[in-house]
Amino acid sequence: MRTATHQRRSAAHILLEALLEQGIEYIFGNLGTDHVPLIEELARWHQEDRASPQVVLCPHENTAVHMAGGYAAATGRGQAVAVHVDVGTANAASAMHNLFRARLPVLLMAGRAPFSSYNELLGGRDTYVHFIQEPFDQGSLVRPYVKWEYTLPAGEITKEVIARACSVMHSDSMGPAYLMLPREILASECDYARARPYSPGRHSAVKRSGVVREVVENVARRLVAANEPLLVTAYAGRQTSTPGLIDRLAQLAGVRVCEFNTVHLNISRDSPCFGGYQPSQFAETADFGLLVDVDVPWVPKTTRVNPDAFWVQIDVDAIKQNLPMWNFATDLRIEGDSAEWLTALIDAVQGLATPAFTARAARRVEKMATMRAEHIRVIAEMARHPGVPGALNPHYICAALGRAINIEDVVINEAIRNAPVVFEQIHRTRPGTLLGLSGGGLGYSGGMALGYKLAQRHRRVLHVVGDGSFYFGNPSSLYAVSRQYGLPIFSIVLDNGGWAAVKEATLRMYPDGDARRSNVFQSELAPDPNFARIAEAAGAYGEQLIEPDEVEPAIVRCLTALDRGRSAVLHVRVAHL
Ligand SMILES: Cc1ncc(C[n+]2csc(CCOP(=O)(O)OP(=O)(O)O)c2C)c(N)n1
Ligand SMILES: [Mg+2]
């Protein structure tokens, strides 16, 4: 009998093995005629009782890519997404933008339309679309959003290709990879013995590591000498050890910590040193600054920065390789792992700390604690009134949500103009319990929530989303996936009747313009939608929240449905834009 190693196997078979060998457990898929060899192999594997990567079918590519994003945000591991030729890639592009900007790994695999027409090869053209789904440059549809791109040239090297994609996408800074799979190649039978294995251990990702002692000491000396140090961050908290380090450094050296465009929770909101979401407030007086894992620390047009301050940048991507222009002045630029550098910096500051320094730092912490307490009082005041029927107060809604959820529940913020309200009113303390949008492609939070839930089923996952963003997130696709795979999520839609961000952008640029005079901002969406019904259509629990005295009971009903395994949509009518 011939052993398995002398058998002929399709490239699709080798691809499934390669994915498993690289630790890929899921294929989030929106399939088409290009994937037929894969479908056939999955069926064969099932018959043979072989464990394959689990396929999670997604009716829309937006859901599939964002699910992979949520999974990667929760685990640090990229999964696979399968989409249909050029058209599926085009549908995936906005989500690929988001994962690229969030530095999240994903292996996007798209088929390529078959190229043979006269039965030369198995898998050749057998239907109309095979003639028209071959553009000149399929990769160009997502090229701006990937670190790596390739077309599988032959089945025998599939394991090498997948190993290469995985090591590139997981290397710092992480990001998406794109692989095209021509149908005839996927179907081709290969000599299995020639499909060399590529162990992840010997073809690993390359991570930023190592600190330079003299550089750390230089930074520590400057920090110890500073009178008003400021740290600005956005995504340091992607590593769960970092928020604790930031808090320790802040309390040790009296550093104010601000976030701008929060992507992760970077410091507990209980920290006395947390200075909120507007670092621009403090940039004029800060005499020493640390930019730690942040793409945009403030908007220069509206921020005055102390010209004499010394700024140090510590970032996994300090050069901002993928931003054509990046113009924030920094005196010392360090590309590295922020957790490692902060650990070393804490040590170095401790080594330099004199009693006088410790006393000065403690005084700063005390002052910041007073400011923080006052801020929390102001924020609580804003949440005191629930609003009026049909025009509920988003502060009140979010504060009520914050009270109702658990300390480990995960909140994903896509509330756009109400995003600051979500950040301020839903009090988070633990690493990994808060996510924001680093890209600009709306419709991300529902898919991310599903992916996060898939990775961490023991936690509740909520996303707070604007009405416009809710539409972008393809809700009919989201709740279908939620139901099919038993992934309950809680969607809170803050419906202000349309696109407040678009209206406000107009007012910022033309404060006295014709749009203002005529009060027409092209921002009002269809009146009276009922988003709860969209949820119900897919078996989820849906509720419209209009009455102020229903806020708490409605949240309880939604959480009860969620805890019983159903997704819940709370459609909240907030004050009109
Ligand atoms: C895919 C995509 N299309 C369009 C936009 C432009 N855009 C930015 S904010 C916004 C409005 C979002 O509306 P909503 O979610 O209701 O939030 P609101 O502005 O009302 O707070 C739009 C359309 C975008 N960022 N992404
Ligand atoms: Mg809106």
Image (tube, rainbow, N blue to C red):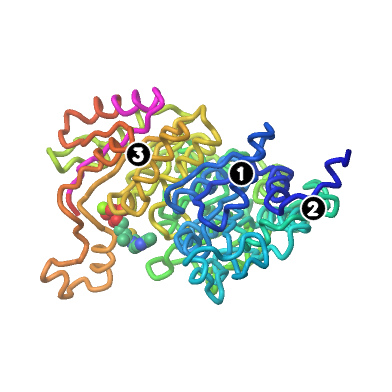
**Residue at numbered disc 2:** 203
Point out residue 6 in the picture as x, y percentages from the top left corner. Answer: 86, 47
Q: Is residue 260 visible?
A: yes
Q: Which residue occupies 35% across, 43% down?
A: 464
Q: Is residue 495 left or right of residue 288?
A: left
Which percent across, then down, holds residue 209?
A: 75, 52
Q: Classify 10 Å Cα crowding around label 1: few (below 14), some (14-19), many (20 and above).
A: many
What residue is pinned by disc 3? Answer: 491
Instruction: Please provide percent x and percent y for residue 471.
Output: 31, 52
Which residues lie in the magenta part? 557-575
What type is the residue that disc 1 sits on? Gln
Nearer to the camera, 489 or 499 = 489
For the residues labelled 1 and 2, the Cα–Cα distance comes to: 23 Å
Q: Residues within 10 Å of mark 2 (few under 14, many from 20)?
A: some
Relative to 547, say whether 577 is above or below: below
From the image, tell me which residue sits under label 1. 239
Q: Is residue 207 left or right of residue 67?
A: right
Locate the N terminus and report the quarter of the image it occupies: top right
- Pick whichever of labels 3 and 2 is earlier in the sequence: 2
Q: Pick whichever of labels 1 and 3 is earlier in the sequence.
A: 1
* Amino acid at circle 3: Ser
Q: CA distance from mark 3 to mark 2?
A: 40 Å
Tell me the element at label 1: loop
Q: Within 10 angstroms of label 3, few (less than 14), some, or many (20 or more) residues?
A: many
Which label is found at residue 31? none
Question: Within the image, what quadrant is residue 314 found in?
Answer: bottom right
Q: Secondary structure at mark 3?
A: strand
Q: Nearer the viewer, mark 1 or mark 2?
A: 2
Residue 563 within the segment the image draws in magenta: yes
Q: Residue at x 59, y 70 (%)?
A: 117
Residue at (85%, 50%) from the top-left corner?
193
- Nearer the observer, disc 1 or disc 3? 3
